[in-house]
Image: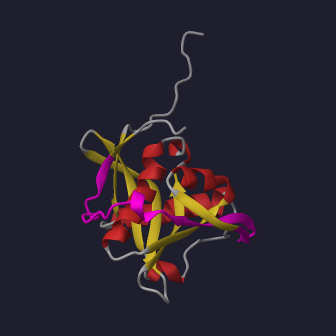
């Protein structure tokens, strides 16, 4: 055949940062709906909950040269309602075509923990879908136990803060280069 099918374009670079612009927050919410409602069926119409009222949304924005293109990953972080030095991460979502790139999911996890660490976090927790627990373990998290949440197996996991130095400029974040995940 003269024309071979081509793979969809995947941006080679990302800006991982707090969602500071309205378009970033809207795109992050839309990505979460696609992943958790449409793709996984965890929620019906929307995955928003009361945590969104207090959480800080983070995004991974694909870059085309120096221009921002689209939100391809998101997660939210927030303090525990009972302990101010305990932080949580939740609703980690990555666009389907970007899931094999460690720059996106791992970059969001790194910024989530490091920015919370800079804001006084002494313990960082997340309820992680069991199929993703290995990624977190490779990133210096430990499982505190497995349980069911929203009808799916999850691990309660805790980050080793020694591997996440405080990051004090999360509003601008950092650049992350694409490479295939292991």
**Residue 181 on image: x %, y %:** 52, 39
* Horizontal and vertical percent position of residue 165: 33, 61
Quadrant of the snapshot with the N terminus: top right
- Quadrant location of residue 45? bottom right
Rendered view: 80 above or below 94? below
User: Going by the image, does 111 lie left or right of 3?
Assistant: left
Q: Position of residue 125 (x, y in %)?
A: 53, 70
Residue 148 is a magenta residue = yes
Q: Is residue 26 magenta?
A: no
Q: Look at the image and give the residue range highlighted in magenta.
A: 146-175
Residue drawn at point x = 35 percent, y = 45 percent: 176
Q: Is residue 148 left or right of residue 165?
A: right
Task: Residue lying at the far bottom in this picture: please name it.
Answer: 82
How far across and how far down the image is residue 172, in percent?
25, 60
Q: Residue at x 70, y 62 (%)?
A: 41
Rendering colour mode = secondary structure
- Residue at (47% x, 44% y) in the render: 102
The relative height of residue 178 versus residue 84 in the rendered view (above or below) is above
From this view, report whether residue 179 is shown above or below residue 107: above
Single out the residue that lies furthest toward the front: 162
Q: Is residue 102 above or below residue 17?
A: above
Quadrant of the image for the C terminus? Answer: top right
Quarter holding residue 113: bottom left
Q: Across the whole image, how many numbered discs are drawn on residues?
A: 0
Q: Quadrant of residue 85?
A: bottom left
Q: Tell me which residue sits at (36%, 63%) in the image.
A: 114
């Amino acid at each position: 055949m003269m024309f071979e099918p081509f793979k969809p374009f995947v941006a080679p670079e990302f800006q991982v940062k707090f969602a500071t612009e309205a378009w970033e927050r809207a795109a992050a919410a839309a990505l979460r709906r696609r992943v958790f409602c449409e793709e996984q069926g965890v929620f019906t119409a929307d995955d928003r909950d009361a945590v969104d009222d207090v959480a800080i949304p983070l995004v991974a924005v694909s870059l085309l040269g120096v221009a921002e293109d689209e939100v391809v990953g998101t997660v939210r972080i927030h303090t525990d309602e009972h302990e101010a030095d305990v932080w949580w991460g939740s609703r980690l979502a990555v666009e389907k075509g970007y899931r094999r790139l460690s720059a996106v999911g791992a970059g969001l996890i790194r910024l989530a923990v490091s920015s919370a660490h800079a804001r006084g976090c002494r313990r960082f927790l997340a309820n992680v879908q069991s199929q993703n627990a290995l990624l977190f373990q490779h990133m210096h998290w430990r499982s505190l136990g497995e349980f069911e949440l929203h009808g799916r197996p999850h691990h309660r996991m805790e980050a080793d803060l020694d591997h996440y130095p405080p990051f004090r400029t999360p509003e601008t974040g950092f650049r992350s280069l694409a490479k295939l995940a292991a």
